[in-house]
Image (cartoon, helix red, strand yellow):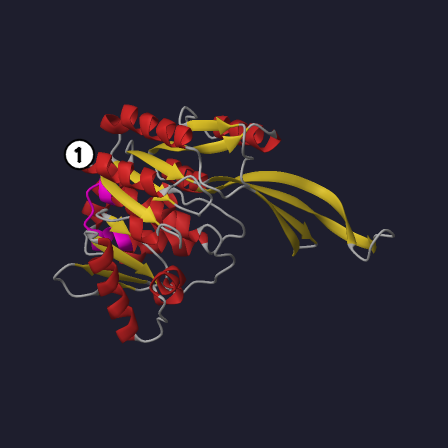
């Protein structure tokens, strides 16, 4: 359990407010078509959806930025969208959520990454992905780094949110981490398979079990497997902390020359795990910038991830909801 008094918890909550966090990575738009089915198409043996509702949500790195905002911080998202209808919807959503868009680069040569979910009578029928995953051009890389350099003195931390959609290239990752070190900024990473081992010397490296298994070509089943995987992460990534997320088994926390620590998952009724990882990295980073130690930050992040899993769909964590729930847990 979090090792902090209620008085310190209130102080920590207040310290969340106004923290500035750059979120660099793959920006996405989640699109939903929701309705009912009463007949089959005469053109093909497929259901005809009568659309009752159509709505849009942030996904990927932009959902991380939204979580920073709902946690009381000031996000500075940096990434790429296309010159298309989804891009215009994306910008409109940013305006509605009062999130600054000066870090958004429009690339005419690639579409806005969009995931369209068709839901009929509460049943997920199909998902349609619109994306290009090849690496962004050197010119776009240069723009991203330039945007970060201009803002680096004003930010408290950097989140690198990689979905392998082409924004975080090997050279860009290295340049961002080098800049962060020179500026003494916290860097947290939510990786994917590609470029997994490029994220060296960051503050926190936070892969999940599958990502770690795929990267090392191993299987993580036993407690011994978890411990060995944590040691491998520390040795190869040279990170200050490695957080291995284990689903229902919580989080395994590793730090050089210190024993492994565990943050257990609190039993909850899980409705939807979508977006939980985004909430975890957002809360973890905000807590570290607010002055929490790594274990307390991991506890809060794990708790926040559990809370959003109780909601249907991708829902960001709210600052008051998180701290009210933790306060009740400590009483």
Q: Residue furthest left?
A: 257
Q: Position of residue 3 (x, y in %)?
A: 19, 56
Kindly state the secondary structure of the residue where label 1 is placed: helix
Residue found 36% across the figure and 74% down from its top: 221
Which of 201 and 326 lies nearest the eye of the viewer?
201
Residue 38 in sight: yes
Q: Which quadrant of the view contains residue 104?
A: top left
Residue 294 belongs to the span the image colors magenta? yes
Which of 34 and 246 lies nearest the eye of the viewer?
246
Where is 146 relative to 296, above or below?
above
**Residue range (magenta):** 288-298
Residue 331 in sight: no
**Residue neighbourhood size for the residue with mark 1, other residues' Cα within 10 Å, grouped as few (<14), some (14–19), many (≥20):** few
The quarter in which the N terminus is drawn is: bottom left
The residue identified by callout 1 is 182
Residue found 31% across the figure and 35% down from its top: 21
């Amino acid at each position: 359990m979090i090792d902090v008094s209620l008085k310190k918890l209130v102080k920590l909550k207040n310290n969340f407010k106004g923290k500035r966090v750059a979120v660099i990575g793959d920006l996405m738009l989640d699109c939903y078509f929701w309705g009912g089915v009463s007949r089959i198409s005469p053109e093909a043996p497929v259901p005809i959806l009568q659309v009752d509702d159509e709505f849009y949500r942030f996904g990927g790195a932009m959902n991380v930025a939204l979580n920073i905002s709902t946690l009381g911080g000031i996000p500075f998202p940096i990434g790429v969208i296309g010159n298309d209808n989804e891009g215009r919807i994306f910008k409109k959503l940013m305006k509605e959520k009062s999130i600054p868009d000066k870090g958004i680069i429009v690339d005419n040569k690639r579409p806005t990454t969009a995931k369209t979910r068709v839901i009929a009578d509460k049943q997920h029928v199909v998902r349609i992905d619109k994306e290009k995953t090849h690496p962004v051009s050197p010119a776009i890389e240069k723009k991203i780094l330039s945007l970060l350099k201009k803002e680096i003195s004003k930010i408290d931390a950097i989140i690198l949110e990689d979905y392998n959609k082409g924004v975080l290239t090997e050279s860009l990752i290295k340049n961002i981490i080098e800049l962060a070190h020179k500026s003494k900024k916290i860097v947290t990473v939510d990786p994917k398979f590609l470029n997994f081992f490029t994220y060296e010397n960051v503050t926190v490296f936070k892969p999940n079990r599958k990502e770690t298994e795929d990267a090392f070509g191993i299987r993580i089943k036993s407690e011994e497997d978890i411990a060995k995987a944590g040691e491998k992460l520390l040795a190869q990534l040279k990170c200050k902390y490695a957080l291995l997320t284990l689903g229902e088994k919580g989080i395994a926390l590793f730090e050089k020359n210190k024993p492994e620590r565990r943050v257990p998952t609190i039993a909850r009724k899980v409705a939807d795990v979508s977006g939980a990882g985004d909430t975890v990295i957002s809360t973890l980073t905000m807590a570290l910038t607010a002055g929490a130690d790594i274990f307390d930050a991991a506890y809060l992040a794990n708790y926040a991830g559990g809370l959003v899993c109780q909601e249907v769909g991708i829902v960001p964590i709210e600052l008051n909801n998180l701290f009210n729930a933790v306060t009740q847990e400590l009483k």
